Image: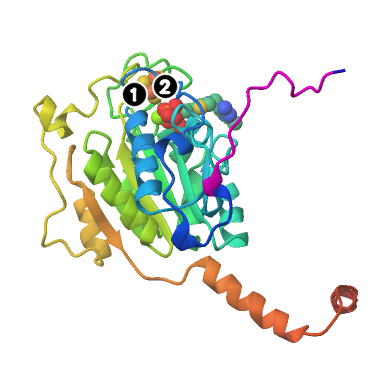
Amino acid sequence: MSSPLADAPARSVNINTVPLPESERRALTKKELSADHPTWCPGCGDFSVLALYFKLIEKRKLWHEKITTIAGIGCSSRFPYFVQAHGAHYIHGRALPFASGVSLSRPDLHVFVFGGDGDAFSIGGNHFNHTARKNIKMTYVVMDNWVYGLTKKQTSPTSPPGFKSKTDVWGAVDQPINPMKQAIAAGATFVARTTHTNPNHVLQMMEAAMDHDGFSFIECLSECVEFYEGAFDASNPRKGGVFNVVPAEHDITDEIAAYKLSDAPFPGHFGIFYKANRPTKNANEAKINSGNMEKVKGLKDWQILQKNFDRLK
Ligand SMILES: Cc1ncc(C[n+]2csc(CCOP(=O)(O)OP(=O)(O)O)c2C)c(N)n1
Ligand code: SF4
Ligand SMILES: [Mg+2]
């Protein structure tokens, strides 16, 4: 009987994954990072975010075993499928708790989370707030298209009033959330805004976010050409719009100023709005763990367990 793998296409061994000394390893190429052919609609803004993620990995010489790519459910959340690296396409709205576990248990990894506005602010809204306030180290890129794309045009928490969708046939009436204000108020320590139509800017924001020690959040406008075409034209100079960067005099450590900057009507500003240094949950927990490990030094596992049981008596 032939092996069940006999018909599988042969895969070449990637010599770059062999643990060579870091100095001898070269950067991963886009070819090595691409997993599947992305199934997004032609022209979808998500393509550009993926291309820039590949560029980031190549530029910063991140290797497969040093990164993880996590997402929930949605068109944007298909992201990890298309990246040849460790990661998970998880449950709708639950990418952040999963990513938190990875981040806290593997501080040596760069944890990147990608997803949509529905995933982040609707079903995952509570997780967004708590991950931000706990300042768990990871980079979260919300690919905001102001609509539920995967499920074919329902109103999302960022859809503007008047937007006609399958859930608001006469036009949306609810006040949309402002992702920047939400992130600042929740306690995110890095808050930035960019748009898929400006590749250099997206890369610049991703690099700055990755270098931040804490929960870094980026709202990246990413047009859904199928269900909300032209939504972001006013922010795209090629479509007659304006791309305004954060004013040079803005103090990114000033929370109130960042909040006020977030209030500007669309297209608003692009760049880093807020950045603060606050201990991460990763660092706080590591401190507690090392203190406790000191207390049980020299004990066998069963003795540590016994001590715990004795304490419960
Ligand atoms: C628990 C659960 N509820 C609802 C859904 C259906 N669902 C899948 S994706 C999605 C919203 C997608 O919108 P968004 O997060 O903005 O991503 P996009 O497709 O726009 O990139 C919904 C409601 C689901 N998969 N699981
Ligand atoms: S439906 Fe919209 S968000 Fe989804 S792949 Fe198509 S263009 Fe992109
Ligand atoms: Mg969406």
Residue 49 image point, x, y percent? 35, 36
Q: Quadrant of residue 55?
A: top left
Q: Residue drawn 41% across and 41% down?
A: 29
Residue 238 image point, x, y percent? 12, 28
Check the picture and name the quadrant holding the N terminus: top right
Ligand 2 closer than 8 Å to the CB at disc 2? yes
- The crowding category of the residue bearing disc 2, from other C-alpha atoms within 10 Å (few below 14, some 14 to 19, many at least 20), is some
Residue 98 image point, x, y percent? 60, 48
Q: Main secondary structure of the magenta part?
A: loop
Ligand 2 closer than 8 Å to the CB at disc 1? yes
Question: Does the magenta portion include 11?
Answer: yes
Q: Which residue is mark 1?
A: 44
- The crowding category of the residue bearing disc 1, from other C-alpha atoms within 10 Å (few below 14, some 14 to 19, many at least 20), is some
| Ligand 3 in which quarter | top left
Check the picture and name the quadrant holding the C terminus: bottom right
Asked whether the beta carbons under mark 2 and mark 1 sit within 8 Å of each other, the answer is yes
- Name the kind of residue labelled 2 in the image: Trp
- Name the kind of residue labelled 1 in the image: Cys
Q: Is residue 145 visible?
A: no
